Amino acid sequence: MTYRTVEELGDLPDQRINAILATRRADDTVLLSPVWFLWRDGGFDIGIPRGDPKLTHLARDPRVTILISENGGVGRGLEVTGTATVIDDEDREVGRQLSVKYLGERVGNEYADRLGPGTYVRIEGRIRAWDYADLET
């Protein structure tokens, strides 16, 4: 395995794969949740609907870890361990960008038009990026 910069991961952060978000419940157990994400400006943006239990977890303890990795065989991965900041998405801009990324232009915009104002979560912190490609034979 070789540790990389995010830029060296190529298109990994642009792929339509789920990230796995780790938040802490009140009893300090970890909840792992698949989430849609955008990677920009050195951090993850994820959409979380108002009223979602993950927002309760983050209000109590904003420490999180989020991870993306290629499935199957050896591959690339990106992890951020840090702090989550909940941000109002009144104009649904982040929600729209997420919808278009994961559902495509037409369906994503139709889906986003049905969304009410929501929130998104910005996650920044310690970045760990890797690539197992050097292990392939």
Image (cartoon, rainbow, N blue to C red):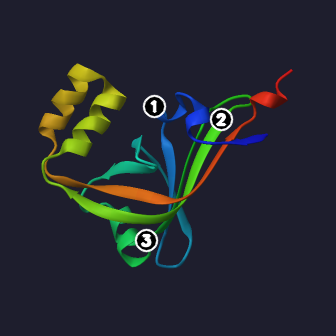
Residue 112 screen position, x and y as percent: 19, 36
Q: Mark 2 or mark 1, which is nearer the start of the sequence?
A: 1
**Three-letter code, disc 1:** Asp
Q: Amino acid at mark 3?
A: Pro
Residue visible at 41% across and 47% down?
Answer: 41
Instruction: Find residue 74 and report its image quarter.
Output: top right
Which residue is the extreme one toward the right?
137
Q: In front: 48, or 121? A: 121
Q: Which residue shows up at 35% across the image and 74% down it?
A: 59
Circle 3: element type: loop
Q: Residues within 10 Å of mark 1 (few under 14, many from 20)?
A: few
**Measured from the top left, where is residue 34 in percent x and y?**
47, 46
| Mark 1, residue position | 14
How far apart, in angstroms, are the residues tagged by discs 1 and 2? Answer: 13 Å
Give left or right: position of 96 versus 13: left
How far apart in space, not on screen, are marks 1 and 3 (Cα)? 25 Å
Q: Is residue 122 above or below residue 76?
A: below
Q: Secondary structure at mark 2?
A: strand
* Residue occupied by mark 2: 76
Q: Tag 3 or tag 2, which sits nearer the N-term? A: 3
Q: Is residue 54 above or below residue 6?
A: below
Q: Which residue is mark 3?
A: 62
State left or right for residue 117 relative to residue 7. left
Q: CA distance from mark 2 to mark 3?
A: 26 Å
Amino acid under label 2?
A: Arg
Q: Position of residue 92 (x, y in %)?
A: 17, 45
Up/down of 95 relative to 108, above or below? below
Question: Which residue does the image show at 62% across and 42% down from the upper left?
Answer: 5
Could you say whether the residue bearing mark 1 is in a helix, strand or loop? helix
- Asked if residue 41 is positioned above or below residue 55 in the image, the reply reads above
